[in-house]
């Protein structure tokens, strides 16, 4: 439960610091088209006075043990700016980021995206050929990783299109959770296949008789080395333009990870043919374990979203501030909750208004607050409940079940 203090009394709007913004809320029924309004100041709690200048932050960084303080002040500055930014600006910024990610217009960004996509398909075939022809378990682990890397992109693309086209009558909450469920299912599949690789590698270590080295298959090493060289070029190119798009940032990180996996696979496969036979199955075990751990973390984070994990603290602070400063008709903010239901948030807000407030006004204020919250980025739905007091047990709180 989060309690907000009562908003200030009716402000004097003659000063220039009071302007119409997202905190302007009609004091009467909008449907009745009345013209009177109730204005709330842009910064009623003087948060802007707490902003630390860039020069002061730079001075803090130069001090001994001042980096932590500078980091804290920078985070506080970002929070204050987010609180004071109108809700419409939050929405417009999110739309701009989404459009930039969806439709890259920079030619260099397009080259990086399409080159990565085409090369991943080609290198996937090349790496699987190397794994099958050489019978190397390390190269098999790298090949499986490349296959599932492409598969995850195809699955997410298909699920996104499917979610957009879902029948609203059959699926009233929409398809936002499809991608989350798809990630979990795909992660389990990825883990299962790599578990097979681990089991086969352990079986090879246990049943191997003698110290005979595996035959060295040069074409396979050349094929994976070619894939490694292409990945290196893509990594360097993506890294050079990583600041131009969030998609490119993801790409260069993916190429970086592939460089480590492919290089390690070549090293262990060659070592199993030239140095010690057990290096090849050991390399496969290490690669497969790394993939399982990585996807295990992904599955855990996706489960948290489906299980209803709370929204970040900064987002809750933003909601509380926007509710408290929405209109002086709101006397208190009793409860604010925001939690995941898939990738986006469900928001529940309990506000307190005067017991003599007309029904039409209570309806209009709560409806407008709900509409404002629902246009915030990553908010799927918002529910605003109006009460006349705050001493009751919070709504929707179930009594703990008695243990038998």
Image (tube, rainbow, N blue to C red):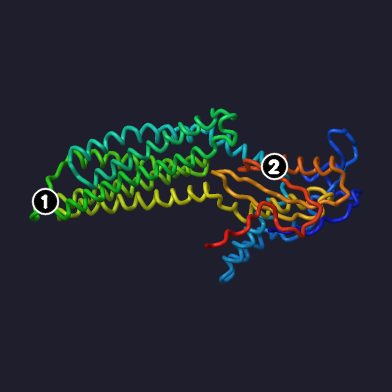
Q: CA distance from mark 1 to mark 2?
A: 65 Å
Asked where in the image residue 317 lies, by quadrant, the reply is bottom right
- Name which residue lies at 86% across and 51% down: 355
Residue that lies at the very extreme toward the front in this rendered image:
404
- Name which residue lies at 72% across and 39% down: 371
Where residue 294 appears, as percent x and y from the top left, is: 39, 51
Q: Earlier in the sequence, mark 1 or mark 2?
A: 2
Within 10 angstroms of label 2, few (less than 14), some, or many (20 or more) residues? Answer: few
- Name which residue lies at 73% across and 59% down: 3
256 sits to left or right of 370? left
Q: Which mark is residue 337?
A: none
Circles 1 and 2 in contact, beta carbons < 8 Å = no
Taking depth in this image into account, of 393 and 5 the one nearest to the observer is 393
Taking depth in this image into account, of 137 and 84 the one nearest to the observer is 137
- Residue at which label 2 appears: 89
Instruction: Look at the numbered disc 1 and give the secondary structure of its residue.
Output: loop
389 sits to left or right of 94? right
- Residue at which label 1 appears: 213
Taking depth in this image into account, of 94 and 303 the one nearest to the observer is 303
Where residue 238 appears, as percent x and y from the top left, is: 44, 41
* Residue 234 visible in this rendered orientation of the protein: yes
Q: Is the N terminus in the top left, top right, bottom left or bottom right quadrant?
A: bottom right
């Amino acid at each position: 439960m989060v309690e907000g203090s009562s908003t200030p009394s009716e402000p004097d709007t003659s000063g220039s610091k009071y302007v119409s913004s997202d905190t302007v809320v009609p004091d009467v029924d909008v449907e009745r088209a009345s013209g009177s309004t109730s204005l709330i100041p842009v910064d009623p709690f003087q948060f802007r006075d707490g902003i630390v200048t860039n020069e002061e932050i730079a001075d803090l960084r130069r001090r001994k043990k001042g980096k932590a303080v500078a980091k804290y002040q920078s985070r506080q500055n970002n929070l204050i700016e987010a609180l004071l930014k109108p809700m419409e600006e939050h929405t417009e910024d999110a739309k701009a980021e989404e459009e930039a990610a969806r439709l890259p217009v920079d030619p260099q960004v397009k080259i990086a995206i399409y080159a990565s996509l085409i090369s991943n398909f080609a290198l996937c075939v090349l790496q699987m050929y190397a794994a099958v022809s050489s019978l190397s378990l390390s190269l098999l682990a790298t090949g499986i990783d490349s296959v599932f890397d492409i598969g995850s992109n195809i699955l997410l693309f298909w699920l996104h299109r499917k979610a957009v086209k879902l029948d609203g009558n059959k699926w009233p909450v929409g398809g936002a959770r499809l991608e989350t469920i798809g990630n979990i299912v795909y992660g389990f599949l990825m883990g299962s296949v790599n578990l097979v690789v681990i089991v086969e590698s352990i079986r090879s270590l246990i049943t191997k008789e003698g110290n005979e080295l595996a035959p060295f298959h040069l074409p396979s090493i050349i094929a994976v080395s070619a894939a490694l060289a292409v990945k290196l070029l893509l990594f360097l190119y993506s890294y050079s333009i990583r600041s131009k798009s969030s998609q490119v940032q993801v790409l260069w990180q993916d190429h970086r990870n592939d460089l480590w996996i492919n290089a390690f696979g070549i090293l262990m496969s060659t070592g199993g043919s030239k140095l010690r036979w057990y290096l090849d199955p050991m390399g496969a075990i290490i690669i497969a374990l790394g993939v399982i751990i990585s996807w295990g973390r992904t599955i855990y984070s996706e489960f948290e979203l489906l299980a209803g994990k709370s929204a970040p603290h900064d987002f809750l602070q933003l909601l509380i501030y926007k509710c408290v400063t929405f209109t002086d008709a709101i006397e208190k903010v009793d409860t604010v909750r925001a939690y995941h239901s898939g990738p986006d948030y469900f928001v529940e807000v309990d506000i307190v208004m005067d017991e003599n407030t007309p029904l039409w006004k209570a309806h209009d204020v709560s409806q407008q607050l709900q509409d404002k919250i629902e246009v915030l980025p990553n908010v799927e739905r918002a529910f605003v409940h109006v009460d006349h007091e705050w001493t009751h047990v919070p709504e929707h709180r179930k009594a703990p079940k008695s243990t038998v």
